[in-house]
Image (cartoon, rainbow, N blue to C red):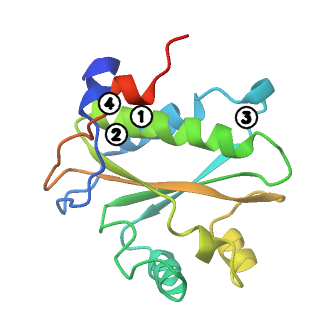
Amino acid sequence: MKDVFAAIAERSSTRSYTGEGLTKEELYCLLRAGLQAPTATNRQEIHISVLERSNPLLAEIEAEKNGGSCPPVNFYYDAPVVLILSGETAYHWTPVDAGIAVENIALAAEGLGLGSVIIGCIRQAMEGPRQAEFAQALRFPEGYSYQIAIAVGHKAAGKEPHAFELDRQVSLL
């Protein structure tokens, strides 16, 4: 397992996966990483719905997404597992908490030698006319809504992590 700084430095979005599924241990490590993320006032308002690649709900979300303004590319790149994070709709800090949880999952995946891609492009589909139907199918708790998703699997191809410009992107005061 990689140390956290190596995982941060080496992680990039994976858009090509092998056909190999995740082990139960790998999946539980990812779920623990997401659920152990800090939340504002320790509210722990994040819920994770786990979908395997064969789940027909992914095709329904894809079709709904393609009816919107997103490009018609498979949003989860045929990864073996997609985790959809929902949270309390009315709680002000839910989007931040979901972002922290999904980053924990992405770093845990990298630490386990897996690839991941964080998914925001389905927001329009998840908040559209089928919102209630999707929420029920994904077993969101009452009062919860889509926040963000992440696809995870074994990398078939990788890419270089993105570059950054410390002097331009950081102000030391």
Give the alpha-carbon distance from disc 4 to disc 1, as whole Å: 33 Å
First reached walking from the N terminus: tag 4 or tag 2: 2
Disc 1 target residue: 29
Give the alpha-carbon distance from disc 4 to disc 2, as whole Å: 34 Å
Q: Nearer the viewer, mark 3 or mark 4?
A: 4
Q: Secondary structure at mark 3?
A: loop
Give the alpha-carbon distance from disc 3 to disc 1, as whole Å: 18 Å
User: What is the crowding at mark 1: few (fewer than 14 residues within 10 Å), some, or many (at least 20)?
Assistant: some
The residue at 73%/34% (across/down) is: 44
First reached walking from the N terminus: tag 3 or tag 1: 1
Count of labels shown?
4
Give the residue type at disc 2: Glu
Q: Nearer the viewer, mark 4 or mark 1?
A: 4
Disc 4 target residue: 165
Is 9 drawn above or below residue 173 in the view shown? below
The residue at 21%/61% (across/down) is: 16
First reached walking from the N terminus: tag 3 or tag 4: 3
Residue 84 in view here? no
Q: Give the percent coordinates (x, y) of residue 34.
A: 53, 37
Q: Secondary structure at mark 4?
A: loop
Q: Secondary structure at mark 1?
A: helix
Q: Secondary structure at mark 2?
A: helix
Give the alpha-carbon distance from disc 3 to disc 2, as whole Å: 22 Å
Whether residues under marks 2 and 1 lie with C-beta atoms below 8 angstroms apart, the answer is yes
Disc 3 target residue: 44
Give the residue type at disc 3: Gln
User: What is the crowding at mark 3: few (fewer than 14 residues within 10 Å), some, or many (at least 20)?
Assistant: some
Whether residues under marks 3 and 1 lie with C-beta atoms below 8 angstroms apart, the answer is no
Disc 2 target residue: 26
The residue at 38%/33% (across/down) is: 107
Of all residues, the one furthest to the left in this rendering is 157
